[in-house]
Amino acid sequence: MTDHTAETAGPSGDRPVALLLPGQGSQHVRMAAGLHGVEPVFTDAMDEALAALAAPGPLGLRTAGLREDWLDCRDSAVTGHVTRSQPLLFAVDYALGRLVLDWSIRPVALLGHSIGEVAAAVLTGIFTLRDAAALVHDRVTRLADAPPGGMVAVAASPEELAPLLGGEVVVAAVNAVRQTVLAGLAGPLRATTEELRAAGFVVRPVASFTAFHSPALAPAMEGADDLIAALPVGDPAIPVMSGYTARYLTPAEAKEPGFWSRQPLDPVLFWPALDALLDGRDLVLVEAGPGQGLSQLARRHPAVRSGRSAAVPLLPPAAGPPEADLAAVRAAAERLRPGRTAGPGGV
């Protein structure tokens, strides 16, 4: 394992950098598309990822037209479907991570949320891009045929919600102290959502038509170990703080096929993982993905609220004109230069 105590600041200033890689729910139409054809490193990495994802898989091609939908589609229902949201989030996270690395920034850790952990696995050398794309391709093909479901975010802790949850609706993610995501098949999730609102909880839907991070997807993922077991696995060159275990991913865990095949079923422990990441050290948390959802969550952490750590998103908070993507990335790059680390709480 890498010695996490031996850290150097690098070009971000006095504080080391960690990358946050977002997942399902952060996608939007034309996410980061304003960088394509303008930022060469991002363009090359995105093209490489899209080409890898377009390669036919053993269960049939479900990602045809991916590039066109990314660059041209304005329908959020299309980009929210598993056949678009998952591969495009993986590709955008990966390409933005490559862009940050090209700035001569050496992250001391990577923390991915959901599909963001697969992008982290490529950036750190656990999987090659082509092999990770095969994993994503297989996952998407399986989940495309899963029963209709969804996810909702609730302003409450898992403990507060436990009395109102049954076996069909489960905690899918712990994103902050009082932000919990629930998942389930469409009917049970709808009923639970109505109960929660009637009980006075604030509930909002998450952009997903699939019950990610719930046992409802177990039948779809049965047999996924077989493909993953055939993929060569390297040791992580950059430490990965796993959003599934809230501890650093070990080489042994990375080599376990079940660790990756269970991810669509297991809850994401983003807040515990962030807490572990910030334990005893000050970091600049760079959100390398669409939106600013993880940055907003990070700003709730005491280490960021106090100004000891900072959160810097690379992209605007929502879809906008192409020039907004470029302006946001260039502003972030400027803040991450030596002596220009973001101030208290981020930007």
Image (tube, rainbow, N blue to C red):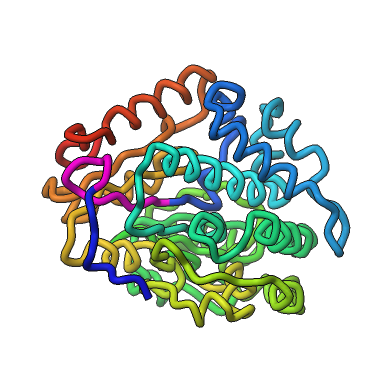
Residue placed most toward the observer, 112 or 126? 126
Q: Can residue 163 be seen in this snapshot?
A: yes
Where does residue 196 sit, x and y in percent of width and height? 44, 61
Where does residue 91 sit, x and y in percent of width and height? 61, 45
Q: Residue at x 26, y 33 (%)?
A: 337
| Quarter of the figure that contains the N terminus | bottom left
Q: Residue at x 46, y 71 (%)?
A: 244
In the rendered image, which quarter is residue 51 located in?
top right
In the rendered image, which quarter is residue 154 located in?
bottom left
Residue placed most toward the observer, 214 or 184? 214
Magenta highlight on residue 118: no
| Quarter of the figure that contains the C terminus | top left
Q: Is residue 214 above or below residue 201?
A: below
Where does residue 167 sit, x and y in percent of width and height? 56, 79
Q: Residue at x 59, y 28 (%)?
A: 33
Where does residue 62 sit, x and y in percent of width and height? 82, 51
Q: How many marks?
A: 0
Q: Is residue 111 above or below residue 341?
A: below
Q: Which residues are magenta?
A: 10-20
Q: Is residue 145 above or below residue 54?
A: below
Residue 76 left/right relative to 18: right
Q: Can residue 200 be seen in this snapshot?
A: no
Q: Residue at x 52, y 52 (%)?
A: 23
